[in-house]
Amino acid sequence: MASQHIVSSFDQDLEGVQMRLMRMGSLVEDAITTVLHALDSRDLEQSAQVIRNDRAIDQMDMDIKEETARILAVRAPAARDLRLVLSVMAMSTHLERCGDYAKNIAKRHSAMLETGPIENSVRALRRMGGMVVSMLSDGLEATIKKDASLAEQARLRDLEVDEAYNALFRSLLTYMMENPRNITTCMHLHFIAKNIERMGDHATSVAEQAIYQINGALPDEDRPKGDTTSFMPPEMPDA
Amino acid sequence: MYDAPTPGSKLDQTDIKITAKNVQVYYGDTQAIKDVDVDIEDKTVTAFIGPSGCGKSTFLRCLNRMNDTIDVCRVEGDIFIDGEDIYDRNIDPVQLRAKVGMVFQKPNPFPKSIYDNVAYGPRIHGMVRNKAELDEVVETALRGAALWDEVKDRLDTPGTGLSGGQQQRLCIARAVATKPEVLLMDEPCSALDPIATAQVEDLIESLKEQFSVVIVTHSMQQAARISQKTAFFHLGNLVEYDDTNTIFTNPTDSRTESYITGRIG
Ligand SMILES: Nc1ncnc2c1ncn2[C@@H]1O[C@H](COP(=O)(O)OP(=O)(O)OP(=O)(O)O)[C@@H](O)[C@H]1O
Ligand SMILES: [Mg+2]
C-alpha cells in the first residue's frame, strides 16, 4: 500500500480480506490440480477429498462476502480502497465457481472408472488445468504486487486454454466417430474439458478484476475468445 | 469537405451556469485562492471538498460577491454567471445575491420572527402580491427545509430562539424562498441530525431540477451521494474537478486520492 490510512485499523481490514482471498485462491488452485491428478492416477480417494474440501471454499466465499460487506458499511471506502473491496468480492465469486467446477469433475470421476482410458486425453486435461491454475495465481499475485501487466498476461492466456479445448474437442470427436464404444468416456472427458474451459473464463475475470483494482478501469478491448466449437459442425464420415 | 456534426458534440453538452477564470483571492498579503479556473454546470449539484482552511468557503463567497463585505479581502480574475461578469461595476450586489442565494457555515438567522426570516426576501424582491401568497411561499420553503412541522405553531417567535440545527434549516428556508438560480451552501448539514440531513439532501436533489447548487461539505459520503460534479481544493488550489463518480472511484491526482481515502497525504 502506497501510504497508510489515518485510521490504522482500516489498513488491517483491507489487508485481512486480501489475505483471505489469497488463501481461498490457493485452496481453489489445489482443488484443480488435485482433481486432475486424481483422474490421471485413477485415485478416487483424492477426488473424494476435493469434493469434501469444496465446502471449505464455499465457506471462505461467504466469509469474504460478509467481511467486505462490513468494510463497506463501516469504512465507506473510496477510490482505490473501494475498488479493492469490490474486486475482492467479485474475485471471491469467480474462485468459488472454479471450486464448483473442480468438484463437478471429481464427481464425474467414479463414473469414468468403469470406462477405459483414452490415449492422451487426460494428459491434455492436466495441461489445460495447469494453464488455468497459472492464470489464477498470476491474477491474484498481480493484486499484491500491484502489477497490472502480470494480470494482463494472465488474461491473455485464456486464448491458450480455449485453443487447447478446441483441439481436445476435435480429437474426442474423432475417437467417437472411430468407435462408438468410446462415446461414454469421450462424453465424460468432454464435460471435464468444458468445465476447465469455463474455469479459464473465471480466471480471466479474476485477472480483469485485478486490472480494475490496480488501474481503476477494466481493459478496453473485449477479452479474446478462442472457443469456436459452437460454430464447428462435426464432420460426418462419408457414407 | 463537409463534416457532419458528430452526435454528442456541443448540442448535448450541459449548460454552463458559472465560469471562473484565473481567480485569485487575498486576505491582506496572504493568498487564499490561487489560479482557480472552473466551469459550474446548470441544473447540477457541485460539491467542493478539501481539508480545513484550503479555501472552499473563500471561493464559494466569490460566487455571490460575499467577499466584498470582508475589508481585507481582495478578489482578482473573472467570474461570469450566464456569461455576465458579476464583478462588473454595473452589477448590483444585492440583486446578485437574490439570484445567487447562500447558506452559511454558521446559522445566522435575522433577529426577527421565524415567519419574517423566510418572508424577508420574497417581500423585498416583490415576489408576492398578497399575504396569502406570502404565507404559501413561507410554508413551501419551510417544508422544503424540513422545518415546517416543528415551527408551524410558533411562526411569530424569534428565529434566534431555535436550536442550532433548526436555525440552519431556517436559513436554508430563507435562501430557497427567493427562488435563487444558484444556491451556495457552506456545510449546510454540519449541525443537523441524520434525519434532517437526509431531508436537506432530498431538498437539494429537488432544487437541482431547476437550479445550480454548489455545496461545501466535509462529508465525503454526502458529496458522493448528492453531487454530480466534485471539486477538490488543496492549499488554495483547485487540484481536481471531475464527475463525482470519477473522483470517488478513480481520481487522477494523488492528493485527491489521499484525501478521500483518509490517508496521510
Ligand atoms: N476573514 C478572513 N481574514 C483573514 N483570513 C481569512 C479570512 N477568512 C479565511 N481566511 C483564511 O483563508 C484561508 C481559507 O479559509 P476558508 O475559510 O476559505 O477555508 P475552508 O476551506 O472553508 O475551511 P473549513 O473547511 O475549515 O471551513 C485560511 O487560511 C483562512 O485562515
Ligand atoms: Mg469553510
Image: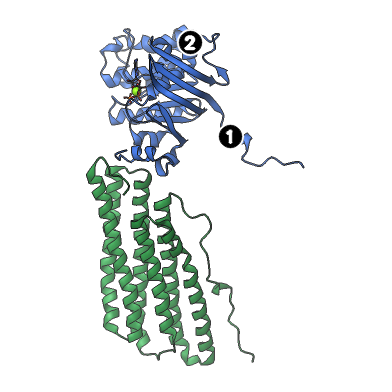
Chain colours: A green, B blue
**Res. B136 in view:** no
**On screen, residue B55 above or below A214:** above
The chain letter under disc 2 is B
Which quadrant of the figure has residue B90? top right
Which quadrant of the figure has residue A109? bottom left
Seen in the image, is B12 located left or right of residue A152?
A: right
In terms of sequence position, does the residue under pointer 1 or pointer 2 come before the other?
A: 1
Residue B1 on image: x %, y %: 77, 42
Q: Which residue lies under the disc numbered 1?
A: B13
Mark identifier at residue A218: none
Q: How many marks?
A: 2
- A16 and A62: which is toward the camera: A16
- A173 and A155: which is toward the camera: A155
Residue B104 on image: x %, y %: 36, 19
Residue B56 on image: x %, y %: 38, 25
Q: For mark 1, does the 10 Å Cα neighbourhood hold few (<14), some (14 to 19), or many (20 or more) residues?
A: few
Give the residue drawn at x 32%, y 68%: A28
Asked if the residue at tag 2 contacts the one at tag 1, i.e. Cβ–Cβ closer than 8 Å, the answer is no
Q: Which residue is at the far left?
A: A9
Q: Which residue lies under the disc numbered 2?
A: B93
Q: Amino acid at mark 2?
A: Pro
Residue B2 on image: x %, y %: 76, 41
Give the residue drawn at x 26%, y 40%: A6
